[in-house]
Amino acid sequence: MTTLRDITRRATIVTTALIVGLTASYAPSQAAEGEARTTITDHPGAPGAMLRQFEDLTGRPVGDVDKVLAVDTGGRTLTGDQLEALAAGKEVDGVTVVGTIPGSRDVLGTTMADLADGAYDGRGDSGTATSLLFASSTPDGREWCLTMCVASGKTIWQCLLSRRTGDVIFTLDLAGSTTVGETKAAFEKANGVTVEGPYTVDTLIGDREPSADEIKMLLDGNDIESMHRVATLDGPDPGWALADIAEKSGVVYAKTRGHLFTLNLPILGKILVWCVSKDGGKTWKCSAQKWGGF
């Protein structure tokens, strides 16, 4: 879902076993905050029906399915961190990924059994997976979901949805000599996930450092009152020092200056990193949303 995102909040992780013993074709039940559970009997369209049921239960969209993983857990119960690792393409001890299926509307119209063999092929008669992991995200990229479904018998699937949010912000203090590439690597290390880019860097100037609320607005892609955008560079060189970006952008001097980097995280999409200096570029305070998802 990742190896970026002062951690103040995080969505509830999946640490409990998926419910068992529900035999009705559609027998939903509310779970703990941030989670919901349902049981479904397999039929054509079951994946889509399952996700719609979760939307009805929570009153919130689960977003578009980005991919489905067919997984053999060996009978183990997986934690939220392990689910995130699998969604991010990492290995989890004792767990085998049978196959990864790109998300599409057609996938939602098939059966669970069809997906359990790790391929969307209309057969599903040789599935070796015991579980299916659906990774989905909302269009604005600020919320995403992991839905784990476990087979119980031949046709019953018990599913648990765990919702993730991207509004947790943490900050790193960096020297002015820190390069663009090193800044990216520092956030990747802090989150345990690799990102692409940065593709662009915006330079903003102002008379004061943005407030915490304004930083959140910047990371949500909005403009703020305390600083305004004066330059945009495409494809910043990873070897550029943070202290040199303003000059390379044609900005000679500003009391407070900041840079907004645009990167990409698979599934989540666009990710923003904000770096600001109020001492002429000697030190920088860089912030980003917690990459707690994929």
Image: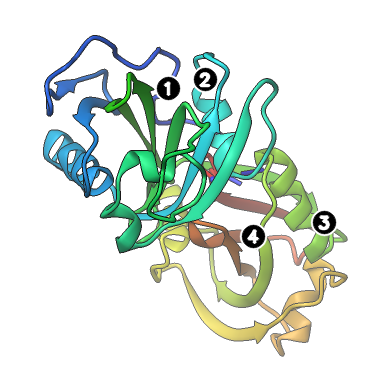
Q: Amino acid at mark 1?
A: Val
Give the residue number, with chain letter if any, for mark 4: 275
Which quarter of the picture shows residue 178? bottom right
Q: Amino acid at mark 4?
A: Cys
Is label 1 or label 4 in front? 1
Callout 1 touching callout 2 (CB < 8 Å):
yes
Frontmost residue, 12 versus 29: 29
Q: How many marks?
A: 4
Give the residue number, with chain letter if any, for mark 2: 78
Give the residue number, with chain letter if any, for mark 3: 182
Above or below, 122 against 89 in this view is below
Q: CA distance from mark 3 to mark 4?
A: 13 Å
Q: Residue furthest bottom?
A: 250
Give the residue number, with chain letter if any, for mark 1: 14
Callout 3 touching callout 4 (CB < 8 Å):
no
Q: Amino acid at mark 2?
A: Leu
Q: Residue at x 67, y 20 (%)?
A: 94
